[in-house]
Each structure stands twice: as structure tokens, then as C-alpha cells.
Image (cartoon, rainbow, N blue to C red):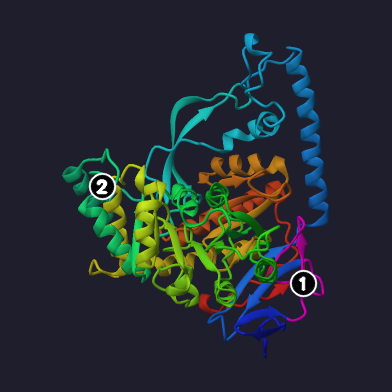
Amino acid sequence: MESKLAPNGDIYSTVNGFMEKAHSESKGAARRNGFVKPGFAQNGQSHHIAQNGGLYQRQFNQSFEETPMLVAVLTYMGYGILTLFGYLRDFLREWKIEKCHHATEREEQKDFVPLYQDFENFYTRNLYMRIRDSWNRPICSVPGAKFDVMERVSYDYNWTFKFTGKIIKDVLNMGSYNYLGFAERRGFCADAARKSTIQYGVGICSTRQEIGNLDKHEELERMVARFLRVEAAMAFGMGFATNSMNIPALVGKGCLILSDELNHASLVLGARLSGATIRVFKHNNMQSLDKLLKDAIVHGQPRTRRPWKKILIIVEGIYSMEGSIVRLPEIVALKKKYKAYLYLDEAHSIGALGPTGRGVVEYFGVNPKDVDVMMGTFTKSFGAAGGYIGGKKELVEYLRSHSHSTVYATSMSAPVVEQIIASMTCIMGEDGTTLGQTRVQQLAENTRYFRRRLKEMGFIIYGNDDSPVVPLMLYMPAKIGAFGREMLKRNIGVVVVGFPATPIIESRARFCVSAAHTREMLDTALKVIGEVGDLLQLKYSRHKLKPLIDHSFEETTYEEIED
């Protein structure tokens, strides 16, 4: 057993390659919404900073500041008032005093089993509808660093919308997953996709197993395998289905899935469809995962106590709502210790992390062979559509004949395939330029700059310092719609998120930083965010960072000052 001192002063113990915190959990880690955040609590802020020579080759810094008590109380009160008025409005609709817009059964079907569940739609009718204008905004241009938005208005409190015919030009895009800026209408990728459209057309009209297997599909899969540094890879037409349709092909009855509690809906659906037993561990909490693995090995299956056929750990590279990065070195160590399998979803991390954009595996310096199933999507860093699975050749060949996404789904469109090939060629530097490498570096710089400036301004920002997903906490339900509207008034397009996509008191705005953003664009966005933050009183943080004007950006440190 070897003890190490982390940069924050916490002592870690390394036992058989598994890092455990020696004392911080026993002193009470920061809790929020009933679960323990990994890390230690300091003045109401939860941190995780790890720099362990055995597992971590770099500093790993994530922070989740605790919700201020007054803000939490006011948020619950806000939802309470909204719920109260929601029941009042439902009463008025029942007695025809207020017009009912939501879907209901016809009069002749009133005695049937209800098709539309009133209580289940309560939130949609009375809360979501009030701020529905913050979502589904139609854009009419390429979703690059800037885009054009079609203006619309509602005269019935967002139940219906009408277009005004006006176009809001050059809205700064702070919401799309365009991490490396490949969503563009001109350039190497766009030209390649255009040529492919002329040669192959748009639709394939068949599955890969029939007559829908193009030479371009084969080329793409070989390139993905080289990019991931694995034996083989396989491409699918839909990122969501890559998870939901392939997990059932890998595990079934008698198998155990250990899933992070904040895993994406596609992973949750795939796990449920598999028929395997599912147990959930606390987000990024290695003590919780270790306990579940230990119990699974010791006790086996319920009732029979037979050993599990397989134990599959499912995690994501970057969690899209928290902005946190998976503690992959520790998970790999646990996986090896208990002889489990690891399924890694790199939808948000592939292209966005690592010195050459190869994702969280490269970011931590983990051997790709230590990850049994490497999954990712082409919808974000590559500016295209679809997903992939990479790993051993036996795994890929098995999925070709057993995955529903392969057997029944129509093949990927040729222009989409060409977009992926072109962007991946660029990232790997095989186009003869350094454009791809420059974009990967630019994204990393933009991410650190944007996150640091928001923290200096006094906002509560969740996640890892290197994550391009940047959640800014709003908390109160009324501020969800207000923030989105005020930002659009100032020509900034943002994504706002609330319950049930997040815990009820943790509504947030989610920014996605891109390599296509210039420093001037980010400064413009930061200025507007600061103005709206003052207007809506969103600067809740009690741990403002001190601006480090005298240091170069790479040398910044994370000191804290009290308000």
C-alpha cells in the first residue's frame, strides 16, 4: 500500500492500482440531491482534484459548488407555486372556464381506458408550456459559430407559434455540439460531401447486410479503427440507436449492468431492453462502484447465488449535463480487479479531449485495449450523424450479425459518411495540413478560457476544467425561460435545461464551446452573459476566482477569494 499527497492536501492510498481517498469521505463529502459527489467539501464547494502517479498522468480538477440554501428554498417555493396554479388551471379547464389546448380523448371515448394520462402530462401542460419558446427554435443556416434563427411569436402562451417572416441574423451559437467547427458549408469537408452526393446520391434504400454496403462504409470503419487504435470498428446510422440497440446484443438475462446514475437516456434504454439486472452507482463515485462490484462477486445472482454470466460497467466520457469527465483510470483499475467488462460512451469526448482529439482514453493515457467496448458518435466533433463501436475484431464481427442496428437499419447516407471521413482525415493530419490539430488545441484553449472567465464573474459552473460542456446554474424555474429569452434578445443562442432532464432544483444553461469560436466571440458572449446574470441575479457563487492578469493562460492557477 502506497500513500500519496494530492495537490489539494488530501491523502490518497493506492492499493492494487485502485486509488481511494483516505479520509475525506469519512469527514462528509458534499451532498446534493441525496447523492455524494466525488471529492471533498470546502466551504460548501465540492471538488475532485487528483494527481496520482500510478493512475493519473495529469491533474484532474472538477468542481460542483453546493446550492446555496436560500436559493434552494426559493427554488422549491417557485415550483410549489407553479404546481398550485397548475392545479387551479386544470380545475378551470375541467369546467370549461379556460380553453383546453392539450391532447384529450374524444367525447365518445370518455369511458375507454385513458390514452392520455392527465397526471403524467401535468408538468408539460402547466410548467413546460409556459417556457416552451426557449426550445425547438427553428434555424435556417449552417449551425456554425453563428447561425440564423426564424423569428416566431405566440398569442396563446406558447401552445402554438406563428412565424413573422423575419430572420434573426448572425446569432452567436453557444449551444450546438460543434466542438471542432466541422459543421460548415464551405471547406474541405463540405466539398467532399458535395462530391459524394453527386457520385452516390443521398439515400441508400437498403441495409448493410443486403445491398446497402458501400465501399465508403468499409473505408470509414477502417479509418475509425485506426483513429481509435483498436482492431476493428463498426459504424451505425444513428447515435442513439448505437447504444440502445447494441447493449441488448452484448448482455441479457443472467448478466449484471453497473450504470452511472447520470448516464444518457440511450444507455438507460439499452440496459432496460437487454433484460439484464441493472444496478446504479453514484455519479463518478469509485467507492460506490467498488461496493457494487464487490457485492456482485460475493453474492452472485439473487436467490440462486450463481455467478453472474457477465458484469458490464457502463460510463460516459463527458457527461452532457454535468460537464464532468469520467474517472477512467480508476474505473479501468476496478474493472481489471473484478474481471468485469467496460462499455465507454465517448459521444461528447471523442474529438474534444486528448492531445490529438482521440477522446478520454487518450486524455488519461489509458491503453485502448483496456476498454472492451468503445462507443462514440459522429454527431458532435465530426459535424455529421451516426455512431460507432470499436474494440476487438471478435466483438465487431459478433455485432455485425447480432445487432438490430445492423440487421434492420438502413445504411448511412454516403454524403454523411464522406463528411466523417473528411473531418477525421483532417483531425489525424492525413490531409497534409495541421488544421485538425490546430482545432483540437483551439478548443482546449477556448474551453479553459471560457470556464475561468465565468467563474471569475461569480457564476456557479459545474464540471471539469477541460470539458467543453459548460453548465451555468440557474436554479429557479422562472429564470430558465428568462435567461434564454434575454440572451436571444442580445443575439446569443443558448440551451437552457430544467426538470426532469436535471434534478428539480438544478436548472441550468448549458454552453458548448467550439474551436470555431474566436476570442472576440467568446468575449462578446461573456459580456452578454454578465449583463443577463446581473439582470436576473444569477451570480450565486461564494467562491469567485481571482483574475490572474500577470500570468500567461497556460500558467493560471485556481485560487479562490471569498465574496
Position of residue 177 relative to residue 433, above or below, is above
Name the side, left or right, on which 324 lies relative to 165: right
Residue 59 found in image quarter: bottom right
Q: Nearer the viewer, residue 363 or 243?
A: 243
Residue type (three-letter) at the residue carrying disc 2 = Ala
Label 2 Cα neighbours within 10 Å, binned few <14 / some 14-19 / many ≥20: many
Point 69% across, 34% down: residue: 123
Name the side, left or right, on which 266 lies relative to 178: right
Residue type (three-letter) at the residue carrying disc 1 = Gln
Residue 77 found in image quarter: top right
Q: Position of residue 316 (x, y in %)?
A: 54, 61
Residues marked 2 and 1 touching at CB (< 8 Å): no
Point 63% across, 55% down: residue: 278
Position of residue 118 relative to residue 175, above or below, is above
Give the Cα separation between the discs numbered 2 and 1: 52 Å
Lower sequence index among marks 2 and 1: 1
Q: Is residue 274 visible?
A: yes
Q: Pointer 2: what residue?
A: 414
Q: Position of residue 274 (x, y in %)?
A: 53, 50
Q: Pointer 1: what residue?
A: 42
Asked if residue 132 lies in the magenta stretch, the reply is: no
Q: Nearer the viewer, residue 4 or 132?
A: 4
- Secondary structure beneath label 1: strand
Q: Which mark is residue 246?
A: none
Q: Which residues are magenta?
A: 22-44
- Indicate the quadrant containing the N terminus: top left, top right, bottom left or bottom right: bottom right
Point 45% across, 67% down: residue: 359
